[in-house]
């Protein structure tokens, strides 16, 4: 696991206190990440607003180590409905 994974998780959870964040590498280089973020902070927000929220949190990481992210955001109710394992 790349150190960037934990840094990204910590950044997101420091802003979205209830968030569960799953990170996976998209290219093998550790700087293109797929992120699944589940948080009730997304409740009532359009998908674009959810993604902007996350991108605002990660903006400084893009200046340093991070090159690209693929986001999947949802609330806990949506994750439960889709039977997504959050463990």
Image: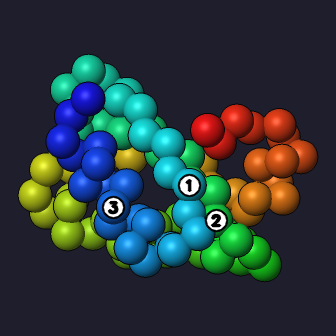
Q: Position of residue 22 (x, y in %)?
A: 50, 42
Helix, strand or loop at mark 2: loop
Helix, strand or loop at mark 1: strand
Q: Position of residue 53 (x, y in %)?
A: 49, 74
N-term mark: 3 or 2: 3
Q: Please, is residue 58 above or below residue 15 in the view?
A: above
Judging by the rendered image, the residue that carries numbered circle 3 is: 10
Helix, strand or loop at mark 3: helix
N-term mark: 1 or 2: 1
Give residue 48's quadrant in the image. bottom right
Labels in figure, total: 3
N-term mark: 1 or 3: 3
Residue at image location 29% in from the left, 43% down from the top: 5
Numbered mark located on residue 82 in the image: none
66 relative position to 53: left or right:
left
Numbered mark located on residue 39 in the image: 2
Is the C-beta separation of discs 1 and 2 under 8 Å? yes
Give residue 49's quadrant in the image. bottom right
Q: Give whichever of 13, 70 is nearer the camera.
A: 13
Q: Residues within 10 Å of mark 2 (few under 14, many from 20)?
A: many
CA–CA distance in space, label 1 to label 2: 7 Å
Residue at image location 58% in from the left, 69% down from the top: 18
Give the quadrant of the N terminus.
Answer: top left
Q: Please, is residue 28 above or below residue 30 in the view?
A: above
Q: Position of residue 32 (x, y in %)?
A: 30, 37
Judging by the rendered image, the residue that carries numbered circle 1 is: 20
CA–CA distance in space, label 3 to label 2: 14 Å
* Residue 55 in view of the camera: no
Give the quadrant of the C terminus.
Answer: top right
Q: Give whichever of 72, 15 is nearer the camera.
A: 15
């Amino acid at each position: 696991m790349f150190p960037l994974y934990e840094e990204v998780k910590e950044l997101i959870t420091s802003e979205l206190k209830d968030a569960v964040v799953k990170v996976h590498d998209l290219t093998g280089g550790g700087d293109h990440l797929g992120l699944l973020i589940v948080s009730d902070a997304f409740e009532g927000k359009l998908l674009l607003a959810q993604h902007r929220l996350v991108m605002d949190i990660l903006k400084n990481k893009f200046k340093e180590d991070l090159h690209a992210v693929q986001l999947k955001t949802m609330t806990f109710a949506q994750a439960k409905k889709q039977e997504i394992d959050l463990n």
